[in-house]
Image (cartoon, rainbow, N blue to C red):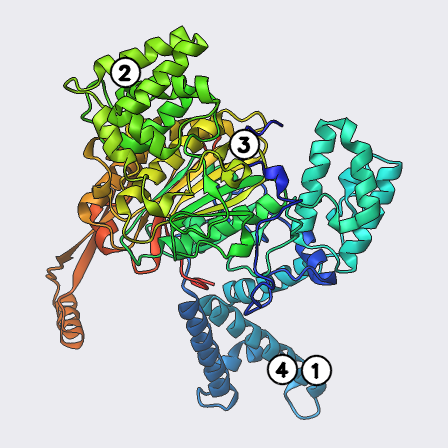
Amino acid sequence: METDGIFDPRDIGSNPPPRPAAPPKPSAPPLLSGRGEAFVDWLRTPRAVGAAPGTWKFAYRPKPPEEPDRIPGRQLVSGALISLVCGWLVWSLCWNGYLGSYWLWPLLLFTPDSWREEGGSQELFVWSAYIYYVLFALLLVVVFGRLGRWQEVGRRYVLAPSRRLMEQQAPAPNPEADPVEWPELRAAGGVASAAADRLAGEARAGLMSDVDHARIARAWESVRVHPTRFAAFIDAVQRLGAAACQHPSGMRDLPARIARHDLLTRQVRIGVTVEDVRNPYQHRGVGVALDPDLLGTSLVAVGPAGSGKTACLVRPVVESLCLQALTGQAAVVAVGAAGVVLAPDYAFDVIVRIGETGSRYGLDLYGGTTDPDAAAGMLAEGLVGDLTALEGGGSRRAAAVLAQLLGPYRAIHGRFPSVPELRELLDGSPAALGALRSALEKAGKDAQLRELNARERQSGRPGDAGALLADRIALLDRPAFTTLFDSTAGDRLFSLRALDHPLRVRIDLPARGHTETSRVLTRLLLAQFTEHAAARRDRSVFAALVLDDASHTITAEALRGIQRLRSVGAGAVLTIRTLEEVPEPLRAPLLGSVGCRMAFAGVTTWEGARFAEVWGKEWVETRDVTNQQIIAHEPLTRASHVVRRIVTGRAVTAESVTVRKVERERWSASELAHSVPAGHAVISLTTVRGERVPPLLVDLRPGGGL
């Protein structure tokens, strides 16, 4: 592939970016050690099929049907114990004669008197008495067992655990269905069976990890699509085993993990739903996980600083996407402020440190494109996309101004101008414009010359965007960014055109001192991502852009680009401190254009009103209970009411229950602002196929709900 002086991700394997000599020692072993039986058990653990979107499918068991009248466990156990004590007390009183011989009347009634007389059949009477004692004891068990619900106790606390234990001790699956045996590969027969034997042996020996399994499975899927790769795949597996088909970086796993991952389903677990009446019954106490099927609809998370957006959402998602990139299934670009650790350095192939002179990689200002109009559109969106008051609407006028300069410049120099050169052209420098005009006249570029002349005629007119563009480009023409956007740097520049490849990229924005520059670059990266994600040829690699802070980034053009991502195998994750940082006309369209929305603890009531409007209403059943005092007219009844009032301190009343269905908001603005605990969030999910999950209250704290 021709690089045109732009970063080529295929260079990673031969010239990898610098990493620490030794990765930091993990504080705890990873969730899956990939050793022997542990890995085999993980691989054989069933995953739920047909579960609701966002459900953690690893070892998931659907909840039994809802029982509205289900007795709480503590009440059930205490009732069973009380009935047992009462039954034993009645038996003891009868056996010891404290209740007289009344309980023996049935025995005396149904046995002849001769059996009890001296010289009669006393042995028969003794046997009859024992049988009667047993029947009487059984009668007590039945009576007090029904009162104490012993049958429900046995079903809930004896039969159910025994059934689960039997399921856990189920025999190993047949080799034809055992994932350890690689049945898909073995079905191809011939040399493929030998390759399957090699992989199965390494899995049992502990030489394979979940990343290895997912990577080789992904490679086999590509072989099925392109049969010409079959011979190379089999040869690699037979030579390298679990190390076959490695990522260009040579890494087979991350040294440490902070979240739970299941690479078979491509999920990362972020929390667990709360046992709350506002959550639907089937979703209570269930793990919540994100995967590309959900992120493909894009995600917006709103919450104040310190609410957990980075720690509980961004870091697990970035780590999951980095692992999927090692398996060849994803490409991730994570953007955050310098000092905010989205993931350690060793988790990335390319790290662009904006504002640091020691950064090995720079950033291509034009996104790696060779089309002047496309480059002008993306650059205009980054520079002035937040200014919607421009004549002509948004950044379209600014894009036309840039195209009038970029096209002629590239026609002469074969490249786009550097930041200082573009600033001179936008400022209308006579020397820069004159030199460019002379070069165009000599080269006979009449069409490009007309573009340049039009730019000169429009310069200085009221409403011209050139001056504003010059002011904004001056933000990038600073000493700290001298080498960052150097268009002559060749392979050192990173471009989002590389999204076709399973690449892991982190871009560190200046932490302080360049706030407006960071916003310009964030808008520029979002515009380049939406443009190149839609232009990819191979969409089997999921492309993701993660913006740890998308404040002042959302524009009308950005929303149109985000809406296109769903159909091109890509998605964006955006976190915002408050909706006030989004222009008022775009707040509702932002929440409406994404499929996944999260409201963290601490949102305000006016922000909650936006979420409540998007989530809509539902029909619920309400019960109105009315207590009405009973007036007794009978003397005996009136006396009993007086006694009850003296004992309880309340008048005797009768309850009247009215059941009706009403429509109410799933989550009201007040509930979102005041009822979401710290470390929690309300999240709604949508898949790329349109399957939806209603808003759920989720505990995002590490270990929360487990």
Cβ atoms under marks 1 and 3 closer than 8 Å: no
Residue where numbered disc 2 is placed? 455
Q: Earlier in the sequence, mark 4 or mark 2?
A: 4
Question: Residue at horizontal 35%, vertical 15%?
Answer: 437
Q: Residues within 10 Å of mark 2 (few under 14, many from 20)?
A: many
Q: Which of the two marks, 3 or 4, is nearer to us in this view? A: 3
Residue where numbered disc 1 is placed? 124
Find the distance from the CA under tag 1 to the CA under tag 3: 109 Å
Give the position of the N terminus as an image quadrant.
top right
Q: Which of the two marks, 2 or 1, is nearer to us in this view? A: 2
Q: Which of the two marks, 1 or 3, is nearer to us in this view? A: 3
Q: Secondary structure at mark 1?
A: helix
Cβ atoms under marks 3 and 4 closer than 8 Å: no
Q: Earlier in the sequence, mark 1 or mark 4?
A: 1
Is residue 204 visible from the viewing direction of this image?
Answer: yes
Find the distance from the CA under tag 2 to the CA under tag 1: 122 Å
User: Which amino acid, mark 4?
Assistant: Ala
Cβ atoms under marks 2 and 1 closer than 8 Å: no
